């Protein structure tokens, strides 16, 4: 058995070529974390233990802590197609279940605006493999939330242009339903922003291990391979504490923080190609200190891995480390003058800015010596 197949959950399962392409392939930059190993081992160990099965996982942490990267890594480890849904405040039940749409005649279709014609044709010609959201996002180059809103408009529009005729109706499943029915690993991003209690109830019901979803056309049962990975960020504006009923359906939870300094440096080297570990060490220390200071002072923003990568990349390209620190890191955390002062004081107290200067001066000296040789 190859190393990447160690945690495969259904190694004998037959998949289509399209489904195989959805299984995430780990890039060279991916470093296996303790959380990834822990979850993979626990899920594999309990997979065939009935009520002890682990199939709903919660990853809770700040932006840039690697939640989505971990969800994708689990897709690779388990050998399951990966897909995701990003929740938004005004989600309704059709965004959880899907929608029934009338197929209007070609004569009526031609009376619509060109944009509506394109989208409806894309829906009518779909093979059922993609969800309505995916189809609309691709056809109109819009966000998931915009696609959900557009779908509701199209439903009303199609009804108006059916002229009371006996028309064919087709059910278009949501991304959640597709993953649930076909046995994929589904990342559910930020369900704690959903406002409608009925939508949360529908989601809660779907996450029961032996659950089912009542669709307008049929009742579907949860595929035995379906895994839900819930990823949440408490610091997002509009987010609430995760619904208790939803949290209760989770069998394994992880608190996601910044990775260790060593892993931060390894990932930055692979991501950016910048290899001076002394400079990277000070950059990483700075990110860690800013993250701790922001938390200690209840500053909403986050100093995470994304900021670390972009700051490293700017320094590697020759930008001033101090100047780019503000544009790549600090201003992403906050632009409030008082909060910035608190962050600056923390860096000065620990001599991190001086350390950064010293590391960059040494790099410059080494470059000059190399050129002289």
Image (tube, rainbow, N blue to C red):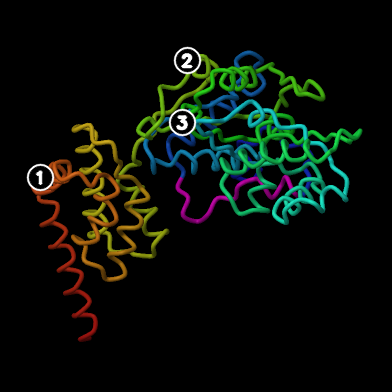
Residue 206 position, x and y percent, is: 65, 21
Q: Alpha carbon of mark 2 to alpha carbon of mark 3: how far?
A: 15 Å
Q: Residue at x 55, y 17 (%)?
A: 249
Task: Judge by depth and name the residue closer to the eye, 47 or 3.
Answer: 47
> Which secondary structure type mostly characterizes the magenta part of the structure?
loop
In the picture, measured across the screen, residue 215 lies left or right of residue 347, that is: right
The answer to whether mark 2 and mark 3 are in CB contact below 8 A is no
Residue tagged by mark 3? 59
Residue mark closest to the camera, 2 vs 3: 2
The answer to whether mark 1 and mark 2 are in CB contact below 8 A is no
Q: Alpha carbon of mark 3 to alpha carbon of mark 1: how far?
A: 32 Å
**Dot 2: within a 10 Å radius of its alpha carbon, few (fewer than 14), some, or many (20 or more) residues?**
few
Indicate yes or no whether the magenta region holds residue 30.
Answer: yes
- Where disc 2 sits, the SS reads helix
In the picture, measured across the screen, residue 311 lies left or right of residue 365, that is: right
Indicate yes or no whether the magenta region holds residue 27.
Answer: yes
Q: Which residues are magenta?
A: 18-31
- Where disc 1 sits, the SS reads helix
């Amino acid at each position: 058995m190859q190393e990447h197949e160690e945690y495969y959950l259904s190694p004998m399962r037959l998949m289509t070529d399209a489904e195989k392409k959805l299984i995430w392939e780990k890039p060279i930059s991916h470093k296996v974390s303790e959380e990834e190993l822990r979850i993979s081992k626990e899920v594999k160990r309990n997979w065939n233990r009935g009520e002890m099965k682990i199939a709903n996982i919660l990853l809770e942490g700040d932006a840039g802590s690697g939640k989505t990267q971990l969800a994708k890594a689990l897709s690779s480890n388990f050998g399951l197609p990966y897909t995701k849904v990003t929740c938004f405040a005004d989600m309704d039940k059709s965004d959880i279940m899907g929608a029934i749409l009338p197929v209007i005649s070609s004569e009526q279709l031609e009376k619509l605006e060109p944009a509506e014609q394109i989208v409806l044709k894309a829906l009518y010609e779909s093979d059922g493999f993609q969800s309505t959201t995916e189809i609309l996002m691709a056809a109109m180059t819009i966000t998931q939330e915009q696609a959900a809103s557009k779908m509701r408009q199209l439903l009303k529009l199609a009804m108006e242009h059916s002229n009371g005729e006996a028309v064919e109706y087709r059910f278009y499943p949501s991304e959640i339903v597709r993953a649930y029915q076909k046995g994929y690993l589904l990342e559910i991003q930020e369900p704690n922003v959903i406002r409608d209690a009925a939508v949360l109830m529908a989601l809660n019901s779907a996450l029961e291990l032996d659950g089912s979803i009542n669709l307008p056309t049929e009742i579907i049962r949860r595929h035995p391979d379906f895994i839900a990975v819930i990823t949440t960020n408490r610091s997002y504006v509009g987010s609430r504490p995760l619904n208790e009923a939803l949290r209760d359906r989770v069998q394994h939870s992880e608190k996601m923080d910044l990775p260790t300094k060593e892993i931060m440096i390894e990932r930055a080297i692979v991501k950016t190609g910048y290899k001076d570990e002394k400079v990277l060490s000070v950059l990483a220390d700075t990110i860690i200190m800013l993250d701790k200071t922001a938390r200690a002072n209840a500053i909403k923003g986050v100093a995470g891995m994304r900021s670390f990568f972009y700051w490293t990349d700017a320094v590697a390209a020759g930008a001033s480390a101090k100047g780019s620190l503000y544009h790549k890191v600090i201003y992403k955390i906050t632009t409030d003058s008082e909060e910035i002062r608190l962050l600056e004081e923390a860096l000065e107290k620990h001599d991190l800015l001086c350390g950064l200067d010293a590391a960059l001066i040494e790099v410059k000296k080494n470059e000059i010596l190399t050129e002289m040789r």
